[in-house]
Structure formats: C-alpha cells, structure tokens
C-alpha cells in the first residue's frame, strides 16, 4: 500500500473494499468523479499530458499508443515515422499478401511484443520489451526517452528499424563508447511466431526480426504491477476489465485520488466483482502471515496481540 495520511483515509478504505470486490455506491460515485469527461481540470492541467494510461488488454494498448504517438508528434512538431519488421518464412522474405496483412494486424501480445510496424518520434517515451542487461537494469518493462534511430530501407521503400538509442534514467551510470550516461542501444532480434494461414488454414512458422521496443505512453495492468506512479489515467470501461484484480491493480498505483483520472465512464459492477479463488486464497495466506508476524514480534503492542 502506497497511500498514507489522514487526507487519504477515504481512498485507503475504498481500496480495501475494491480489493475484496465489496465497493459501495458511494465508492462508485467517488471514482466516477474522476472520469475525464466529468473533470475540466484534466483539460487545463499540462502536467497530465505525459501521465501513463493503464489498460487491460494489448490490443487497446497498441491502438492508444499509436494515437498518443501522433499527438506527441503534433505537440512537439517532430516527424513521426513508421518502422517495419522483417518477416521470413523458411528463410525467405514473406511475400504472401494475405499472410503479410494478417501479420501486420496482430497485436503485441500475439507477436511476443514485436510489432509489425512501430510509430516512432524522437523524444517520445519508449518501453523496452526484452531483457537486455539485468545487472545494468535494462529489462523488460524499462522505459526511457528515444534519442536516435538507425534504419535501412526494404525493397518496398519502407523503413526497417535496425537499432535505437534510448535514454533510461535508472540504468547503469557508466557511459558506453560514443554515448552519454544512461543512453542505451537497443538492437534488433528475432522471434518465432506460429499462425494459421487465413486461406489454407495450415500452420505457418514465421521468423520476425524487429527491435523489441514499443511506444511507452500506454501500458497494460499486468506490465504496471509493482510501480508507484505520480499520475495515471486508467481505463475501467473496457470489456476486458473483469474481476476485482485488474481494477485494484490499476487504482492502487497512485498515492491519492487526486493523482488518478479515469479514461471513460464505466459500470458499477466493474468495481464490485468478487476476486478469483486463487486471489482469495492468496489474501487469506497474507492475512495469516501478518497475524503470525504480530504474534511473533516482541515489540507488538498489547492491542495488536489482542487483535491477533
């Protein structure tokens, strides 16, 4: 729990009920008050323009990231370019038009986080989708600012990304040759994808080569776990926002209700769904551990021991 202080007491109590799927109508109205369409402050507060958006599914994430990248390009007056992957079948460049079109439409979850084409703008927020250097803290989920790109042109005149330089503030301090501190080269790699051909219905094995980066404006609830964020915008209106787990994960990233906006209206049942059996068992396990800790700690107060 990242929230504390008397001013956050109502928010903390709300989070406790949300975790158990026991939210009230008052809780619903409280969260509805943070829907962007109901809050003029969001439109006027420039600090929110770079707030991360958290969604439940990768398809929504990819689509919103394209829109956010376009907005960033317009806001900064920098040029947006698309950088294509290289797909091969049995060692040869994929030329089957039906399969090429299908491959281009696949979201990042179905392509091991290697998009068919990536929209990039110098200066934008980038997310690394592969572990490069665990000791140097360049891991899957690291974010930074795009500084440079290197690319070539394919036979169709499309830009093919070869590598990019990303400034990651939490990376190792020692600068690499010809780079400033915290500037990290992210190079292309290959992954194997398996799909059913849309016409023949036969199983195909495709080798995709792409630099493992994604626009970092929008992330999934799964990818956001473990982070404490200053400001976030969450999507509770998605059909994929089911169960108590995802709403709780998204809402609990901020330290106060004022640090949170909701992307669009949502139904009450989104925040009053019961947790899954696995989650309920984990909650019981954690409660037992907490009680055992209180009992075994010699400095526990008499009141705490009575509660245990």
Image (tube, grey):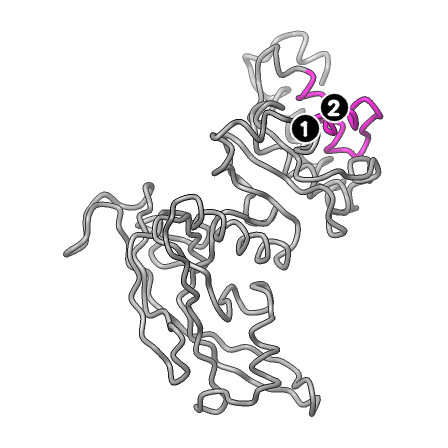
State the residue in front, 38 or 34.
38
The residue at the point 31 percent across, 45 percent down is: 171
Q: Is residue 252 magenta?
A: no
Q: Nearer the viewer, residue 308 or 130?
A: 130
Residue designated by label 2: 30
Q: Is residue 7 left or right of residue 288?
A: left
Which residue has dot 1 on it?
A: 34
Mark 2 and mark 1 in contact? Answer it, CB < 8 Å: yes
- Up-down: is 44 above or below 78? above
Query: Considering depth in this image, is 295 or 169 the residue closer to the camera?
Result: 169
Quadrant placement of the C terminus = top right
Give percent across and percent down for residue 250: 63, 38
| Residue sitting at x 78%, y 36% | 271
Please determine whether, in this image, residue 79 is positioned above or below residue 248. below
Which numbered marker is on residue 148? none
Look at the image and give the residue range highlighted in magenta. 10-34
């Amino acid at each position: 729990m990242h929230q504390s202080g008397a001013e956050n007491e109502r928010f903390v109590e709300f989070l406790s009920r949300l975790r158990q799927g026991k939210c009230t109508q008052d809780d619903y109205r409280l969260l509805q008050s943070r829907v962007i369409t109901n809050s003029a402050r969001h439109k006027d507060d420039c600090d929110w323009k770079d707030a991360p958006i958290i969604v439940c599914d990768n398809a929504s994430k990819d689509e919103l990231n394209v829109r956010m990248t376009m907005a960033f390009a317009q806001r900064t007056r920098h040029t947006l370019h698309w950088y294509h992957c290289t797909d091969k079948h049995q060692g040869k460049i994929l030329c089957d038009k039906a399969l090429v079109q299908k491959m281009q439409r696949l979201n990042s979850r179905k392509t091991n986080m290697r998009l068919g084409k990536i929209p990039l703008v110098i200066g934008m927020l980038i997310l690394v989708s592969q572990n490069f250097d665990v000791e140097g803290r360049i891991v899957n989920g690291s974010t930074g600012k795009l500084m440079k790109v290197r690319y070539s042109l394919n036979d169709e005149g499309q830009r093919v990304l070869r590598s990019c330089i990303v400034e990651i503030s939490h990376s190792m301090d020692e600068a690499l040759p010809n780079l400033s501190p915290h500037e990290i080269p992210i190079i292309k790699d290959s992954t194997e994808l398996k799909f059913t051909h849309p016409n023949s219905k036969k199983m195909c094995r495709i080798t995709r080569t792409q630099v493992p980066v994604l626009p970092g404006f929008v992330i999934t609830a799964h990818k956001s776990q473990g982070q404490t964020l200053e400001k976030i915008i969450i999507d509770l209106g998605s059909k994929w926002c089911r169960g108590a787990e995802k709403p709780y994960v998204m809402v609990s990233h901020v330290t106060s209700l004022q640090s949170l906006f909701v992307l669009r209206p949502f139904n009450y049942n989104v925040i009053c769904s019961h947790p899954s059996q696995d989650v309920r068992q984990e909650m019981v396990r954690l409660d037992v551990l907490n009680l055992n800790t209180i009992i075994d700690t010699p400095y526990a107060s008499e009141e705490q021991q009575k509660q245990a």
